[in-house]
Amino acid sequence: MAPIDLLFTVLNGLSTGMAVFLVAAGLTLIFGILKILNFAHGAFFMIGAYVAYSIIGSNPSSLWIFILAALVAGVVVAALGFVADRIVLRRLRNVDEAYMLIATFAVVLICSGVVKLIWGVNYASVNPPPLLDGAIAAGPLFIPSYSLFVIVAGFVVYLALDIAIHRTWIGKLLQSVANDGWMSGLLGINVPFALTSTVVVSFMLAGLAGGLLLANQTLSPILGESYLLLAFMAVIIGGLGNVRGAFLASVLLGVIESGSSLLIPNMPGMATYVFVILFLLVKPQGLLGGHRI
Amino acid sequence: MKIINAVLFLACLAVMFTVPLWADQGILFIAGLVLVEVVFALSWNLLFGFTGLASFGHAAFFAIGAYLCGYALRAGIGAPFLLLILAAGVAGAVAAVLTGMVLLRRTTGIHLAIFTLALAEILRILVGYSTALGREDGLASIPRPSLELGFASFNLASGEAYYWFLCLAATVIAAFLWLVCHGPFGRILVSIRQDPERTTFMGINVPAYRLAAFTISGATSGMAGALYAPWAQIVTPESAHWIHSTQPMLASLLGGAQSFWGPVVGTVLFSIINYSTRNLVGLSELVIGAVLLVIVLAAPSGVVGLVRELRRRLSARVSQTGPGTEGKVGPKGKLVQEAA
């Protein structure tokens, strides 16, 4: 394997990993604070993608329109998240994990049914906006500029989340709610409001990810599943609910995925699953397990 | 109440066995699939509803049985069909023992879910890669066998004949699972689900019982797969897909995971919803999702639990008017409800 291949694989993996993190970010947030493993996250990611697609069509006219559509998708899905919290998630606090999974899986079915009814089952695809449809030449290496965009977007979302959680009063507040909701309530924190805001932000991240990752992939009612499993693995490997852990795990999984598609192209996903199993057998608490959010 | 139950049960059996006499080919095919999925769901629920373990990769055991049976029938190795079904059960059991020995001692809850899911996906990728198993296209045109019983031989090639065989086989496996769940073994499983720690204190080897339940469940799931292959006459890697693993979960939760018959009710309801909304793409998912959500949020004990609750209230009201108020809903009745 030539070093240029290796470099390309790493870059590719970084881009895949960031895409996974964009989906995993909201998932890990909701898990870290509400302790709910939200199976429906992928479905709302898909709705975000469809909303953005409805705004920009197959050929977005400029980068800014593309980003704006992603933001709008984020807002729309955040609103859906508020509804989902009122109807479903609020009732799932303090029930058995299996019931959470099944209830959120029911939401997945509803979302995918609604998507099929509104947008149909036909595949659609979206081209990257003008600025991002080429590739940047760095010596002998050609990097698709859309991959760079995804990497930058992933970093920006990660930094924003990390700073918000570890450096601001909002983050401290959420950490205390995550640690002990009852005690936080006694200290005068509006716990229900904090939890609802977490859900809304998590869903907003799902919608935003849907809009940002829209280009270069097939838009179909099964889009949600494709990223959901990887994002789930990232959340689990990162140490359930830990944003930094999820970030590291996403990048790790992305690089493994892209490396395995270079080495064993006939078995997509194989290396990832084997890695996840071995990793969890050795270190079940995850990369940064023990440190909450 | 017992008489009503018995009549209902016999009526269901009668409906099940007479489907080929009044339904067209399409409905007959769906009815056969329901029987297979019922066995699959009952196997899954032995783990979830009785032992308290949620496997998210149960389709793997199903696929092992289906591929084993489909491959053997296509290759025409001449093994008796009943032996093939048993072999599928053994294969499922072996796979379950191997995975269970590694997983069950270390993990429960979400970790177990992720482990089983990842293992099943690995199996799906391997099957999709294997040329002998037809790669992504799977094994097509699987012949239906004939049943050699020594004294008689039945050709199962026709849809009706194989359907009746399916009815018998599903009844036998369901009866086996019923016995497992309602004997002393099942009682121990229920107590493990309710409180593993306390069960350990009572001197019960909890990991061993969990492994045993996992093995039985894997075996019967494998048999469900073996029954499926000649019925659908095609087996694809999709049968190991994690979406297929969610089928028994949805059915069990919809019907009621804490009761033995819940998965059966759930599977039938699912098929009815699917069939009646088949003309509008997306509607079936919407309806199933909404029904499931209402059930999980409003009645976590499922349809069967809901019916039981209604009956209990009804009988309480009846008995209030007559003498002997406490006789009908005594502590014994509650115990039976929990264990059943």
Image (tube, rainbow, N blue to C red):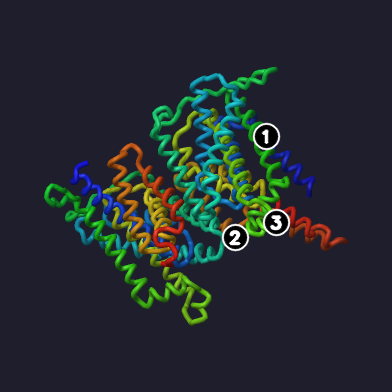
Residue linked to disc 1? B172
Given residues B246 and B184, the one toward you in this image is B184
Does B334 sit above or below residue B122? below
Whichever of callouts 1 and 2 sits on the residue coming sooner in the sequence is 1
Q: Residue at x 57, y 43 (%)?
A: B272
Does B236 sit above or below residue A26? above
Does A275 sit above or below residue B165? below
What SS does tag 3 mark? loop
Do the residues bearing badges 3 and 2 touch, measured as CB atoms within 8 Å? no
Q: Is residue B268 visible?
A: no
Given residues A118 and A59, the one toward you in this image is A59
Q: Position of residue A287 (x, y in %)?
A: 39, 59
Distance from disc 1 to disc 3, alpha carbons, whole Å, reads: 33 Å
Q: Chain of mark 3?
A: B
Residue linked to disc 3? B202
Residue linked to disc 2? B298
**What amino acid does circle 1 point to?**
Val
Q: Chain of mark 1?
A: B
Whichever of callouts 3 and 2 sits on the residue coming sooner in the sequence is 3
Distance from disc 3 to disc 2, alpha carbons, whole Å, reads: 34 Å
Q: Chain of mark 2?
A: B
* Same chain assignment for discs 1 and 3: yes
Residue B31 location, quadrant: top right
From the viewer's perspective, is the residue at label 1 or at label 2 nearer?
Answer: 1
**What amino acid does circle 2 point to?**
Ala
**What amino acid does circle 3 point to?**
Met
* Same chain assignment for discs 1 and 2: yes
Do the residues bearing badges 1 and 2 touch, measured as CB atoms within 8 Å? no
